[in-house]
């Protein structure tokens, strides 16, 4: 199935952009408005980012573990990083101090590839004021801003998770969108073509999907391209905002980054949370290899 997109979701032009620059965040941190900072540093092949957090984080930030707090248990035909249960996510956000009225800024090491997962989940569960620090810790320190190694004990939050605010695809809807609309594959191009597959047991892509590595939406410093550049980039892939667009990756994490980039471009998009790791769990589903047709 695919949920409908309410009129105020990212890409509709109804609110501020989904990212925040270093200078603007620094000003918010000096202000009186409630602000929650979430450190979502994570690597698919490395240890959890808690060690990096302890060595230095944005002052006042709480660490959020992507595998524990932003994903459910893997397997069972749901992929490697299925969406967490609403109650689990709500509890994690409350521990981090998220309230219904707080501005939430999420960040990672740079690029937003894991921070986007927290952004998407908060939006999906009904929080309207959440943004990703453009460039992450790298941009923060490059601007001369300080880090802290002090432990943070957040006051308990009152965030109430109400899932369903962001459009979601299941496998059947993803297959249909690949045929009838635009389904973007956010993985590296060589994984899309099936030339290599370092993580999942089957290589290739969903038939009809278009290769759109999410790293192509970033500049050399790990910040997002300008909205106009992103619009041009996605238009070349057939996503010009006039039709339905969806995104998937290996397990739904970097696909959230693709949805974020599309939102910056003003293009609403659905997420296939199970992504490739869920798709291939049913061996009756077709697999394509090589370059996309046409």
Image: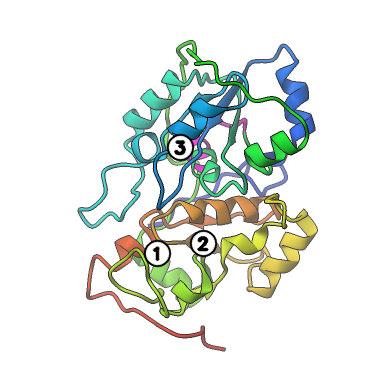
Residue 184, above or below 6: below
- Tell me the residue that label 1 is attached to: 173
> Is residue 133 among what the camera can see?
no
**Tag 3 or tag 1, which sits nearer the N-term?**
3
> Is residue 226 among what the camera can see?
yes
In the image shown, does 276 or 154 lie closer to the viewer?
154
**Tag 2 or tag 3, which sits nearer the N-term?**
3
> Real-space Cα distance between discs 1 and 3?
34 Å
Residue 47, above or below 86: below
Residue 190: % across, % down: 48, 76
Between marks 1 and 3 in the image, the one whose residue lies nearer the viewer: 3
Would residue 71 be counted in the magenta stretch? no
Residue 252: % across, % down: 42, 54
- Tell me the residue that label 2 is attached to: 246
- Tell me the residue that label 3 is attached to: 49
Magenta stretch? Answer: 120-130
């Amino acid at each position: 199935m695919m949920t409908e997109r309410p009129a105020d979701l990212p890409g509709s032009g109804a609110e501020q952009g989904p990212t925040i620059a270093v200078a603007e965040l620094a000003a918010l941190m000096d202000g009186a408005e409630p602000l929650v900072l979430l450190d979502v540093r994570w690597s698919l092949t490395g240890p959890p980012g808690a060690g990096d957090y302890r060595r230095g984080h944005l002052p006042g930030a709480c660490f959020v573990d992507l595998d524990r707090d932003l994903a459910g248990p893997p397997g069972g035909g749901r992929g490697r990083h299925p969406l967490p249960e609403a109650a689990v996510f709500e509890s994690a956000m409350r521990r981090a101090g998220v309230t219904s009225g707080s501005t939430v800024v999420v960040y990672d090491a740079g690029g937003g590839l894991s921070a986007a997962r927290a952004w998407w989940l908060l939006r999906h569960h009904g929080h309207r004021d959440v943004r990703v620090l453009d460039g992450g810790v790298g941009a923060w320190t490059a601007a001369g801003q300080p880090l802290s190694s002090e432990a943070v004990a957040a006051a308990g939050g009152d965030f109430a998770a109400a899932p369903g605010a962001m459009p979601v695809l299941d496998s059947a809807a993803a297959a249909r969108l690949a045929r009838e609309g635009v389904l973007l594959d956010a993985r590296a191009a060589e994984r899309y073509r099936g030339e290599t597959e370092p993580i999942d047991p089957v290589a290739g892509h969903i038939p009809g999907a278009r290769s759109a590595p999410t790293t192509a939406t970033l500049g050399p410093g790990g910040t997002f391209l300008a909205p106009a550049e992103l619009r041009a980039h996605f238009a070349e892939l057939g996503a010009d905002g006039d039709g339905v667009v969806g995104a998937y990756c290996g397990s739904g994490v970097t696909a959230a980054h693709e949805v974020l980039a599309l939102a910056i471009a003003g293009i609403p998009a659905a997420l296939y949370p199970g992504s490739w790791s869920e798709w291939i769990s049913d061996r009756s589903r077709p697999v394509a290899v090589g370059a996309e047709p046409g």
